[in-house]
Image (cartoon, coloured by chain):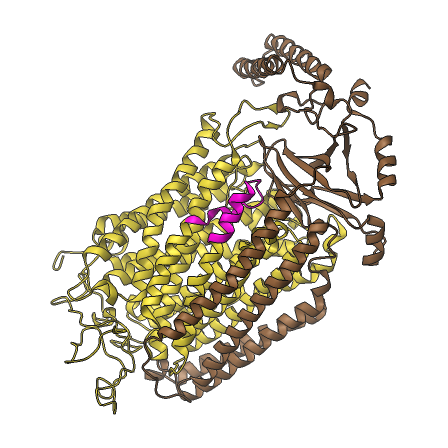
Chain colours: A brown, B yellow
Amino acid sequence: MTALLFSLVIIVGIVSIVQMLRVFDLSNALKGTDEIQVNDQETNNIRWAFVVFFLGFFAFFIYLVASYGDQLLPQSASLHGLEYDWLMDLNMIIIITAAGLTHILLMVFIFKYAKNVSPKATFVTHNNRLELIWTTTPAVVLTIIVIYGISAWNSMLMDKPEDSINIELYARQFDWTARYAGEDNQLGKANFRMISTTNALGVINSSSIDDRLNEYDDKIFELEASREKVFPGGVSDDEILDNIILVKKNRAAVLQYEEQSKNENFDIANDDIITKVEFHIPVNKSVNFSIRSQDVLHSAYMPHFRAQMNAVPGVITHFYFTPIITTKEMKKITGNPDFDYLLLCNKICGAAHYNMQMNIIVETEEEYNKWLAEQPKFNVAQAQ
Amino acid sequence: MAGHKETFITKYLFSYDHKMISRQFLLTGTTMAFIGMAMSLLFRLQLAFPGESFAVLNFFLGDKWAPGGVLDPNMYLALVTIHGTIMVFFLLTAGLSGTFANLLIPLQIGARDMASGMMNMLSYWFFFLSSVVMIASLYVESGPASAGWTIYPPLSALPQAMPGSGTGMTLWLVSMSFFIVSSLLGGINYIVTVINLRTKGMNMLRLPLSIWALFVTAILGVLSFPVLFAAVLLLIFDRTFGTSFYLSDIYIAGEALDHTGGSPLLFQHLFWFLGHPEVYIIILPALGISSEVISTNSRKPIFGYRAMVGSILAIGFLSFIVWGHHMFVTGMNPFVGAVFTFTTLLIAIPSAVKAFNYLSTLWKGSIRYTPAMMFSIGMVSTFITGGVTGIILADAALDINLHDTYFVVAHFHIVMGLSAVMAMFAGVYHWFPKMWGRMLNKKLGYVHFWLTFITAYGVFFPQHFQGLAGVPRRYYANTEFPLFDGLSDISYMVTMFAMVGGLAQFIFLFNLIYSMFNGPKAPQNPWGSNTLEWTTPVEHVHGNWPGELPVVHRWAYDYSKPSKDGTDYRIPGQDFVPQTVPLEEGEIDGEGH
């Protein structure tokens, strides 16, 4: 394949060099009006060349479909994915027909109305009936596309089943973390000011607020102490002061947050479960993802599930779907024993954007429950 | 004007003459295009041979950005970003509109010059300044802007997030501010000129379609560029003065930033409120140029002139209410997504009308395959191929899995990039005799066309297949997981075509420069056109027409018009009727009623 392509490119290169040399010979021989006007011989060559080009183009299309067709829209592993694929097929049939027919017309007209075979043009300015036809035909076809498209869109985003499992996908440069809502199926609150080395997601429960306030106090103390040791060329006193102000602001914001949410139940975070590297979901159960970002925009993209939603700092976005094929079954379907579902990042987020991924394991409900029971709960992990 | 003494500086540098300014735009735009193209070839090398070492990368980028000849991931993103910025703004906005609006508006409406020569000159020099700043940004130590040409914050707002968001991004924003000033100065001038300075008899429905397209383009630019300016300004505020327009709840590089209440999505709304009309700012002039070239070289009136004008207006209007289709997966309210799906798909109707009208212009014509005509035919083909995939991406449901994949890359490169570049080539081949008084070499034009057309499809068509398989765009490499291993041949094929296509552009460059000085002298009206620009002297004069301004009596498309009795052409022995020829008694002008 590679060798074939390479030789193809070399052939195109050689042909073009030969052509260029010929051109220079010719252009030296022919000066005057031939330089400007296109003679019949050239016209004839060009119309044939266009025919060859368009046939080659169609052949290229068929070649690509034959070579890569099986990898396009890989087997859908989610319930709405089946509807998605059906809609895609419908749209593809429409656009390939439209583009194919217009290109055939273009090719025929180029061939048939070239100057050498059609020396005299017919004076036609417009045709209301024709124009009406080719305005209304696309309008009708597009109406069909719009109706199917919008109803699919609504069902994919707005008909969330009541009993979905809540999972949070948390993005940062350059990895993903998943957080399960646990037995109560409620995700605990989180705040970016609560993020620390021990609490990477900034999850809030009653003890994490106190921990964080203590950490802030330690930090302020540490910074104050470092003011004594300012030396030329190092961090300046002003910079340290700025830093202290920032930390104090953050501390005040956390305090204020605590005040405001006196009546909130922070205990719902206690049974949350946090996992990295891979996350598991049960087959045939609706999963509702809440998507957050720590720093810049990211996008949670799961191509096998026809699922994508951006992670936007400051906003929680949502996407839900029902997986229908387990990883094990998919390994058989694809004939690839190493197959894994992937969560990719699909919004430019920095240098390692291309390597920000997480494996998704779809398994039976028993396997899923067993796996989940083995994971430490948030308050347990926190105590360690 | 006439008789005043010209020095080198007033004639070639700070000229008020629209013909000179048009040439300045073309040459600056072409230079920028070659830089942008070279960048794409550099990152295509990495995509075809991920992680492999190339001396050429080290040669261009140095040890810092290509240590040992292996491209640095940050530099990869920088190349992608600046390639996009240059191609969208510097080549296809300023290069295309700047060249042809300046050249064609006064000449085709019968005006002595633009309404304000001074503003016109400033428009070019702001563009030049903006180009210089953009190029300068390539040389800053932390690297040029790398957040993608859409520069979404917070990535673009925080130097902690990537090196390119430091000084490089500041220069990007400065450059873009100059660019917006240039666009506005130019745009206002074009609008005023078309409205006020049409010669006697040139009513709006006798304007050539190129002028209609450039006129609506200028209106779109004047309405939408200020919104980008606002977006850029607020981003500068966030970066420099600690405001929180676009920033909220961010924890980066070990600290929680003091920003709350802003929204990154605000930037996207502002950006795409320009960004979508921008696509039509690029494609409308291309459609206008193609209309002229196709009609002239088919020796037939453009089919359905009024429908063409109507569709330009419809596209122009609709382009303002579709920007949300860039944001389907940002978490916007699904109801809003449905509305944007509907408005976006509406645009397909006027676009389809245009495609069909081009086809029916060819129908029963007598086609002359000049290089310009071939590029215009290529443009019709790419406009259709790239346009139909827009129907899929406009569908919010289908966009979920295709958003930000190579399918999008293929779509907009073909429908916007290729179509506009093809039309720009068509315009240069067609109007070069008017710009420089000499002819481009036709044979070289043919070679250039075929290599460009074949390799362009070779580069962008296979990318649809990568996108449908789920390959995300802006990935430095697809080697970190086995999912896309089966598609690496496509990356390889695309890069090979890109190399040949890139080299082919040097044929054009050679032709352009060689013919400027050595091309055969242009005849008065080389293509047998009706429009007014071919009534001016081949050698440029200030004020365009040495004597009185021409008076217009008919539309621009009386090609192959028969005489009253139908035995010969309207003008015996000549298959075109210039706009300055008076109507006979009982002769119908234009489409009639």
Q: Is residue B323 magenta?
A: yes
Q: Residue at x 29, y 79 (%)?
A: B559
- Look at the picture and state if A82 lies above or below A196: below
Tell me which residue sits at (39%, 64%) in the image.
Answer: B287
State which region is magenta: B321-343
| Residue with the most extreme bottom position | B567
Please say if B195 is above or below B76.
below
In-image side of B445 versus B98 (left or right):
right
Residue under the image location 35 percent in, 55 percent down: B217
Which quadrant would residue A74 be assigned to in this image? bottom right
Is residue B309 found inside the magenta-colored segment of the image?
Answer: no
In front of the other: A312 or B428: A312
Secondary structure mostly seen in magenta is helix
Q: In the rendered image, is residue B403 in sight?
A: no
Measuring from the top left, give residue A210's x and y in whole percent. Answer: 69, 12
- For the residue pair B422 and B299, the one nearer the viewer reads as B299
Q: Is residue B542 among what the camera can see?
A: yes
Residue A185 screen position, x and y as percent: 74, 30
Q: Quadrant of residue A165?
A: top right
Would you say A287 lies left or right of B32 here? right
Locate the N terminus of chain B and report the quarter of the image it occupies.
bottom left
User: Which residue shows up at 66% across the image and 68% down it?
Assistant: A64
Residue B158: image quadrant is: top right
Residue B162 in the image: state x and y as whole percent: 58, 36
Where, quadrant-wise, is the C terminus of chain B in this rendering?
bottom left
